[in-house]
Every structure is written in structure tokens, then in C-alpha cells.
Amino acid sequence: QVHLVESGGGSVQSGGSLRLSCTVSGYLGSSYCIGWFRQAPGQDREGVALIDSTYGRYEYSDSVKSRFTISQDNIKNTLYLEMNSLNPEDSAMYYCAARASWTTRCAFLTNLYNSWGQGTQVTVSS
């Protein structure tokens, strides 16, 4: 397992932007899944964006595609989520999640990930 710490959440108005960061401590290996999930009150945790290092691909949920961008800085050991054109439906607790040494296709399945951060709150007002 790795240790994950999110930051960058806050309150913005509809149409605004935020950038979330996730600092990664520990060894992910060369094949891993890492991504962002979110959970609004009373709702299930849902996948937002992920990086699949084995297959070199990025995946986004339909609800954020073209508005959010996931990226990572391997020198800084940091994962980012750039969020643009935010709307109230994006309000949620956002979590960073990772699974080290994973060689099959990554997916938005919460039980695939065995490392989670504590979350950072994003609130979008209309």
C-alpha cells in the first residue's frame, strides 16, 4: 500500500475551476492504477478519472469528460485533477485512490483500490 494525501478542495461558484493534488508516498511500481473518486452525501462513491500505467491510458467518467483532466508528476510524486466548468453536481468529497503492482486493466471499481486518501471537499454554488 501507499500513503495518499489530497489537497486543493474548496468552494467555488458555478463555472469556476479548481485543481486537486494528491501526494503519493510509497512505491507504486511500474504497473499501477491511480485515480480520483468522489462521493456526495447519500450517494455511492463514483470514479471520476484514472491513469492506467500498464496500458498507458487515461479514463474519465462521462459526467466529467472534457471538463476534468488527470495528470501526474512523477518527480514530485503528485497526482492532479484539473477541474473546469464546475457545476453544483460536482460538489462532493473527492478521494485519491491507488493500487500498486496491478497488471490488468484498471477500472472504476472501488474494491480494486487498496490505498485511499482522506478526501478533500469540493463545493460548487450556483
Image: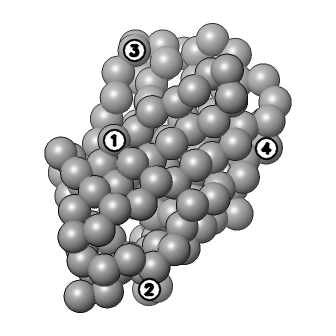
Packing grade of label 2 (10 A; few <14, some 14-19, many >=20) is few
Residue corresponding to mark 4: 3
Assess whether mark 2 and mark 1 are in contact (beta carbons under 8 angstroms): no
Q: Earlier in the sequence, mark 2 or mark 4?
A: 4
Q: Nearer the viewer, mark 1 or mark 2?
A: 1
SS of the residue at dot 2? loop
Residue 55, x across and y down, in percent: 40, 13
Residue corresponding to mark 1: 69
Amino acid marked by disc 2: Gly
Q: Earlier in the sequence, mark 1 or mark 3?
A: 3
Amino acid marked by disc 3: Gly
Q: CA distance from mark 1 to mark 2?
A: 26 Å
Residue corresponding to mark 2: 42
Q: Viewer-proximal residue, 49 or 14?
A: 14
Q: Earlier in the sequence, mark 4 or mark 1?
A: 4
Left-right relation of 7 to 45: right
